[in-house]
DNA sequence: CAGCAGTTCTACAGAATGTAGAACTAGAGC
DNA sequence: GCTCTAGTTCTACATTCTGTAGAACTGCTG
């Protein structure tokens, strides 16, 4: 239920990169530019994807304004942290998972973790 | 490409729970018992799923013996840690993600993390 | 070499996703 | 109020992934 499709992810990436809300046309244009997948899509396609993302609670839609505007329901970092917790939550041996996880982390990241844990 | 289907996950859970390798028939029987999904499946179904899991490198197959035997390619904890890293790797702002992640962790887990980080 | 246990091939159904035309709707201007 | 039209929703179809399993094939064992 968590994983998104290719296009859905592209849209979310754009929304996560913009704190303000965007219209379907903004997104259509952004998706067409080569930086972001470079796809030339019909407006309805973008709308459909946005509707699906809304249903999945990934985006929030502002219906008051006429070209509806959309924004990510949560910050990307939060979403990713949630995903990580989702994975961890599915483990019966959480300690073992954490051990492996930390074992593979870079030194900087280990340092970051120590710092975060210190101020908790 | 990472996420597994319902049945695929059930099979992996069984394989992860057994360090020795299992045959498709072992798995078929195990899947039929009510503890694990309680599904009565055809042997070919189990075989198909195992082949797919092999293609995805989730399981390793021993072809020497005649009822082929299968085992998980990696320990569950390792798999999950990998998944978590996969998520984290997709972030440009890893520190932010880690901050959120640690922020949502239980106290015991925080303690576990400190302990692990100490002996690193 | 005949049977059969076991494996691989092939097939189809259902869900999720990508894609977009067709049909509908709300508000702007007359 | 009525008519356009931008914008939205509906509907539809292709593709891929997964679940499911019969059909066909293969390697032993007697």
Image (cartoon, coloured by chain):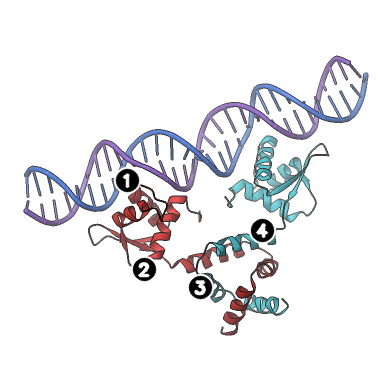
Chain colours: A cyan, B red, C blue, D purple
First in residue order: circle 4 vs circle 3 = 4
Q: Do the residues under discs 3 and 1 have CB atoms within 8 angstroms?
A: no
The chain identifier of the residue carrying mark 1 reads: B
Q: Chain of mark 2?
A: B
Q: Secondary structure at mark 4?
A: helix
Query: Label 3: how many residues lie within 10 Å, few (<14), some (14-19) or many (20+)?
Result: some
Q: Which residue is mark 4?
A: A79
Q: Which mark is residue B42?
A: 1
Residue B3 against residue D1 in the figure, above or below:
below
Residue A8 percent location from the top left of the image: 63, 47
State the residue at coordinates (71%, 51%): A14
Alpha-carbon span between mark 4 and mark 3: 23 Å
Q: Which residue is mark 2?
A: B19
Residue at numbered disc 3: A96
Q: Please rate how many residues cluster around mark 1, counting C-alpha atoms within 10 Å: few if below 14, some from 14 to 19, many from 20.
A: few
Please tell me which residue is depicted at 53% across the width and 73% down the height of the picture.
Answer: A95
Q: To which chain does the residue with label 4 belong? A: A
Label 3 element class: helix
The foreground one among D14 and A89 is A89
Task: State the CA–CA distance, disc 3 to disc 2.
Answer: 16 Å
| Crowding at mark 2 (Cα within 10 Å: few <14, some 14-19, many 20+) | few
Q: Foreground mark, 4 or 2?
A: 2
Q: Position of residue C17 (x, y in %)?
A: 58, 44
């Amino acid at each position: 239920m968590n994983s998104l499709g290719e296009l859905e992810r592209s849209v979310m990436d754009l929304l996560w990169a913009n704190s303000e809300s965007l219209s379907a046309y903004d997104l259509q244009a952004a998706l067409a530019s080569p930086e972001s997948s470079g796809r030339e899509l019909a407006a309805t396609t973008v709308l459909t994807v946005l509707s699906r993302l809304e249903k999945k609670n990934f985006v929030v839609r502002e219906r008051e304004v006429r070209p509806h505007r959309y924004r990510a329901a949560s910050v990307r970092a939060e979403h990713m942290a949630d995903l990580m917790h989702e994975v961890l939550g599915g483990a019966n041996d959480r300690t073992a998972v954490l051990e492996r996880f930390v074992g593979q982390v870079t030194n900087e990241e280990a340092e970051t973790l120590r710092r975060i844990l210190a101020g908790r």
